[in-house]
Each structure stands twice: as C-alpha cells, then as structure tokens.
Amino acid sequence: MQNDKHPSGAPWRNFYGRFRGKTIRASQKDYLDNDLDALSPGPVGWDVNPDRVKLDPDAIVGGKPLWLEIGFGGGEHMIAMAQRYPDIGLIGCEPFINGVAMLLGKIRHADVANLAVHPGDVRDLFDVLPEACIAKAFLNYPDPWPKTRHHRRRFVTAEHLVPLFRVLKPGAEFRVATDIPDYVRQTLAEVPKAGFVLQTALPDGMAVAWDDWISTRYEIKALREGRRPHYMTFHKPA
C-alpha cells in the first residue's frame, strides 16, 4: 500500500501536466542556474516537511502585501503587475520549467525587485503558507483539460480551492480569466462552494476585463482562433 507522505514528510500528490518542454536554451539555463534561488519565496517543495516548516510572509518580498499568481505561463502578467504596483510583492507558481526560465529572463531585463518565484505545484506552497496572508490571487488561462474525464484535474476543484481560500486574507480578491466556456461553467459552480463570493455581474460582466488587465500570449492566441475571453472576480468574505 502506498504511503500518503513523501519521504521528506510532504504529502504525495498526483501532478498532471508537463514539467519540461523544448530544450532549454543556454540563456535560459543561465537564468535558472543563477537567478532562481535568489527569487525563491523559501524552502518549498518536496525537500520540506510542511508539518515543521512554515514560510514567513513578511520575509518573502520585504514585508510588502502579497499577491499570488497561479500558473504564470510566460510571465507577461506577473511582470506587468510588478511594474505597475511596486508597493506589493507578487509570488508566482509555475511547474513548467520553460515558463519559469522565460519569466526569469523577463525579470532580469525588467529590473523589478518585488517578485518571488516558486517553480512547482502551488499546492506545495499552500502547505507552508500561514492562514490569511495573501491579499489577491490570479488564475489566468489555466490548463483547460477539455476532456470530461479530466475535469477533476482543473484548478477549480476543492483540492485547490479550499487551501487557496485558507491562505487568502478576508476581503481578498480572486480573479479568473479563461476562454473555455466549460471552464467558466465549472468555475461558477465550484468556486462559491469553497466559500468565495462572486462579484462579477452575469452574464455581461464576464466580457469586461479588469482596468489593469494585461493580455497574455494565451489570450492573444484565443482571440486569434475565435474564442471569447471571460473574466470573473470572486472575493473571500471579510
């Protein structure tokens, strides 16, 4: 019978998706080798026992209010938010190492100092964050897992939403952007079950992006292929 814990003490979890894609370029390897450690929010991942280790949010990005981006893709949105809001700290989680390398390159050239990067599953970060420490969270164009049998792999399930609710501060905002109608359906059905309250007026409000929204490569591709973006805002009750 399989243990429900990793030898380090962290819980075993199935992960669905890719950790690595095309060959990492020399410049991207340089970013990973020389920049990633300094941007880590702390010792998170399988080398940590979440029963013993907890992160200090005030130490992550110099005591700034913390925002969280779940699956930052190529990092366009993260960089734009960090530049627009220098008085906040933004943690990005992304298990796909090619995307991590792309973000690191953007950070180096953008010269922003209010970002932290976790190159792994956001659930590992949830394990070591204290309750009510994140002021805003973003889920932009998550993996749609279009097959019905794979819908349980989507982020908008209790396995992800319940710990996200725990780490968000009362009154915190949770934004979701997607171009997949069935992902909209599941989001509207499942996110309130975790305790969140929908703020977006249905249905017309979903067509209106946030004032500070930065279109990502995934949205540009969706528009090019004729798919309509949907924008949903939830909050954790105060």
Image (tube, helix red, strand yellow):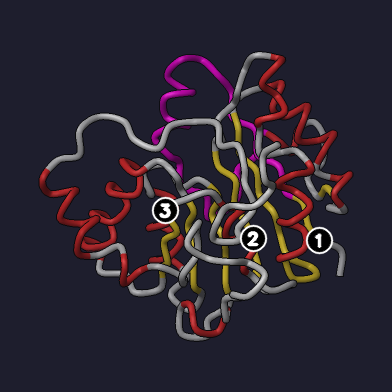
- Earlier along the polypeptide chain: callout 1 or callout 2? 2
Residue 184, image quadrant: top right
CA–CA distance in space, label 1 to label 2? 16 Å
- Earlier along the polypeptide chain: callout 2 or callout 3? 3
Secondary element type, mark 2 = helix
Instruction: Residue 214 in the image: state x and y as whole percent.
Output: 46, 47
Q: Residue at x 75, y 35 (%)?
A: 187
What residue did someone put label 3 on?
Answer: 119
Q: Amino acid at mark 2?
A: Phe
**In the image shown, does 221 or 162 lie closer to the viewer?**
162
Instruction: Residue 87 in the image: state x and y as whole percent.
Output: 48, 79
Secondary element type, mark 3 = loop
Tell me which segment is drawn in magenta. Answer: 207-233
Tell me if mark 3 has few (under 14), some (14-19) or many (20+) residues whose alpha carbon lies within 10 angstroms of its own: many
Q: Is residue 160 left or right of residue 103?
A: right
What residue did someone put label 1 on?
Answer: 236
**Residue 111 vertical placement versus 144 (above, below):** below
CA–CA distance in space, label 2 to label 3? 14 Å
Residue 126 has which mark? 2
**Residue 157 vertical placement versus 128 (above, below):** above
Q: Amino acid at mark 1?
A: Lys
Q: Is residue 2 left or right of residue 189?
A: left
Q: Amino acid at mark 3?
A: Pro
Does residue 222 belong to the magenta stretch?
A: yes
Q: Residue at x 56, y 37 (%)?
A: 15
**In the image shown, does 179 or 204 lie closer to the viewer?**
179
Q: Residue at x 81, y 35 (%)?
A: 188
CA–CA distance in space, label 3 to label 1? 26 Å
Does the CB distance between marks 1 and 2 fall below 8 Å? no
